[in-house]
Amino acid sequence: MRVDLGRFWDSEAEVAALEAALARAGFTDSGEVARLLLELRASALVRKLDEAGRRRLQALLPALLADVARSSAQLPVLRRVLNIIEATGKRSAYFALLAENSAARERLIELCRHGDFLAAQIAAHPLLLDELIDERLLSLLPTRADFARELESRLEQLQEDDPEQQVEALRQFQRAALFRVAVADITGALPLMQVSDRLTDIAELIVERAMQLGWRQITAQFGVPGCGDGARSRPVNICAAGYGKLGGMELGYSSDLDLVFLHDSHGERQETSGARPIDNQVFFVRLAQRIVHLLTMTSAAGRLYEVDVRLRPSGKGGLLVTNIEAFAEYQRQDAWTWEHQALLHARAVAGSPALRARFEAVRLEALCNHVRRDTLRGEVRSMRARMRRELSRGDAARFDIKQDPGGVADIEFLAQYWALKWAREYPPVAMFSDTIRQLESVASADLVPQATVDVLTHAYRTYRAAAHRLSLDDAPALAPVTDFKETRAAVTRIWDATMADEPQGTPL
């Protein structure tokens, strides 16, 4: 039943009467609930509401309190709901939506029952309340195809080819899509690895659209880049390769994007087709700058992603867009072992299908034929030791899940070491960019015992799940040193057996 708030909106109302009404409605701590409601009544939100907004809030509150009273976590849920109401501000149409749509209201209560993360997302972006209207929110698992259709629909609704509006549409799409993934994640409907898959899908769709948008903007100024010899000319292709978490399909909700841009321009003539043509390399630099700007600019709806382009050949001093053949030559002749480790976690994620296929061929050929295997163990071990020294945040009381011995990075480096070591004889071990399938590949090829890989994949999933839970609470990936003791010891034994100067037989 609805909560009778009596003369609550009258500043002269008796608090005792309010507490009694709340107790009758089923609140176990009616005094604290009354205090929270009185804080809302005195808030800037209520003071700034117009008469229509105040009526809508007055209509909503009794029904909302009745729903909260039935919750298994009354006070935490109420605090989150009231934060959302205050953040909604003058958008009082949402008060009406929730008052009139009991199903949407119940979905809001359910989401607030699952902790702070989802409630904080809605409070930060009240437009997400629109998602509560969809009855499938808590039952239908999101897919890449769903996201692609939604993005297409949002962009089709734009009235004009306005770059700012398009970026705003991308951001609104991203925010709603991330929210849907988070709902499936936090309610337990979507396993962690699939959460990362869906977050990766969202990022790839956005990068593809940003590249298309950047291409239209720059070609409108300078024409289309072409290349060839003599009178013959062909259009130039570009693509983007994702490294790191994007390449390895391990994105989190706030992950950066590591991107490398590539082109296939060559020949004696390399220039654009505009009235005042420019050299293709100048075009590519401006295009890459525009794409990065689109992905990182702050719109009314916020920023899409942080983007890091420092993994391109020759580092931050190299060209923003690299010729695919120059990239291939660099990987053959000049790349360090750590760059081949990074290449293992790289994938073509957007742009020309033909150039994406060429990148994948270059990647596999470099990993199979141009790794310095005579010094591989020592270089991998040295890089890992350096990372521990420089990046670990652990101490005597806390275990850094990512960087400390026996943690995530040890497992990733083992997978990379084995893939690089055996890629020449068994190319399939270097085909996959994610750690789990790299490990499973060396087991399938009978290069590492299945039992060893089972230990590592179980540890990897356990660690990632723990780090993910901490990230949802905006906490660092640190655990008490008493946690994961057996898991850490098992990973460390495998690391020591594999990375010893003289291999001590088969890894345990």
Image (tube, grey):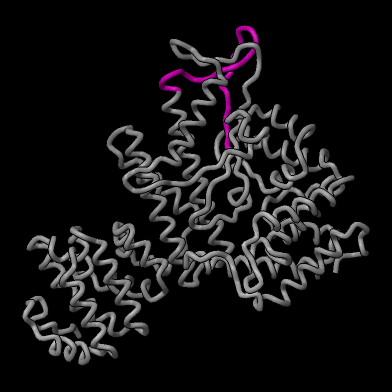
Is the residue 231 above or below the residue 23 in the image?
above
Nearest the eye: 331 or 160: 331
**Which residue is most to the front?**
396
- Residue 12 image offset from top left, x and y in percent: 6, 80
- Residue 249 image offset from top left, x and y in percent: 60, 53
Locate residue 10: give its quadrant: bottom left
x 85%, y 61%: residue: 498
**Which residue is most to the top?**
230
Q: Give the range drawn in magenta.
A: 219-240
x 43%, y 28%: residue: 216
Residue 290 appearing in the image: yes
x 16%, y 69%: residue: 57
Quadrant containing the C terminus is bottom right
Quadrant containing the N terminus is bottom left
- Residue 221 image offset from top left, x and y in percent: 41, 20
From the viewer's perspective, is 103 left or right of 453?
left
Is the residue 196 above or below the residue 188 in the image?
above
- Residue 83 image offset from top left, x and y in percent: 29, 68
Nearest the eye: 148 or 471: 471
Residue 233 on the magenta span: yes
Residue 422 appearing in the image: no
x 84%, y 50%: residue: 378
Is the residue 462 above or below the residue 263 in the image?
below
